[in-house]
Amino acid sequence: MVTGKRRLGFFLRREPGMTTTSCAKELAKSSRESIGILDWECMGGRRACRQRGRRATVWFLIFLRHRQDSGLRPIALPEDNRAVILEIVHYGHPALRMKGRRIAAVDAGIRKLAADMLETMTAANGVGLAAQQVGRPLLLCVLDISCVTDRPSRMFVEGREVDAAAWMPLVLINPEISVSGRERSATEGCLSFPDLSGEVPRPERTGVRATGLDGRPLEFEATGLLSRALQHEFDHLQGILYIDRMATKERRRLDGPIQQLLEETASKSGMPARA
């Protein structure tokens, strides 16, 4: 989806001469308070990041926090296992109409795919991305609404409101959702429909049950932009697109650009596109 936790990642400044292994050992010794917690970056990747108004070069390794304590448990990954930017498929690609297959186990392949999807979503300035959008019909999606300031979100865990931005990014495996509340219309875009946006009605509140990247159950509720993004991405996992949710008049308004996109996808692939 495009717009107008438990933390998954921790950042540690990488000093000259530090290897990935030494970074991991140093991070494991550090307390949560003594290391800078920044936005998501790719596994083992280097990037200039903004921290307290300054730019700093950092080295990132994924660590998952235990649910009840402050321990850090590393995910073992090869040193060259860096996240890459994947191709986002456009409307007409058959994967967008496929229902996702259930993921049996959260293994290294799924963790790598999730990292690649997060990197891809961030590079495309999106707030959500489903596996179907990178040509993989699986029950897997990623979200990060922390960069959006003009469309608020609220998140509730075990009935208590939490800081939604602090739980970003979200990786949801085999998610199930329930929706409630009055339907409201708001503008949505989609990374598989470049430069096309329209009004989509959706219920106000979303409940989620899923498996996290650490293999543990994850359950929460959301309102605002996060709720809308969750419903948008869950639709992708069922082969449903945001244009399917639009009112007839709104959908017809976009008929021309959508048909053009369909023809472009068919021309690029050399095969008939699937609407």
Image (cartoon, rainbow, N blue to C red):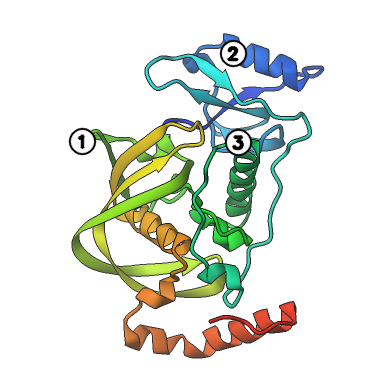
Count of picture labels: 3
Q: Position of residue 118 (x, y in %)?
A: 58, 47
Give above or below for 157 relative to 239: above
User: Which residue bears the numbered disc 3?
Assistant: 107
Q: Is residue 160 visible?
A: yes
On the rendered structure, is 217 left or right of 82? left
Q: Position of residue 117 (x, y in %)?
A: 60, 50
Q: Nearer the viewer, mark 1 or mark 3?
A: 3
Query: Residue sitting at 72 percent across and 84 percent down?
Result: 267
Q: Position of residue 107 (x, y in %)?
A: 60, 36
Give above or below for 275 relative to 231: below
Query: Residue sitting at 60 percent across and 42 percent down?
Result: 110
Mark 1–mark 2 distance (CA, rounded to whole Å): 31 Å
Local crowd size for mark 1, using a 10 Å CA cut-off: few (<14), some (14–19), many (≥20): few
Give above or below for 73 relative to 150: above
Residue 28: give its label.
Answer: 2
State the image quarter where residue 61 is shown: top right
Mark 2–mark 3 distance (CA, rounded to whole Å): 22 Å
Give above or below for 124 relative to 201: above
Secondary structure found at label 2: helix
Mark 1–mark 3 distance (CA, rounded to whole Å): 31 Å
Q: Position of residue 29 (x, y in %)?
A: 58, 9
Q: Which mark is first along the chain, 2 or 1?
A: 2
Residue 159: give its label.
Answer: 1
Callout 3, which amino acid? Asp
Q: Are marks 2 and 3 in contact (CB under 8 Å)?
A: no
Local crowd size for mark 3, using a 10 Å CA cut-off: few (<14), some (14–19), many (≥20): few
Secondary structure found at label 3: loop
Q: Which mark is first along the chain, 3 or 1?
A: 3
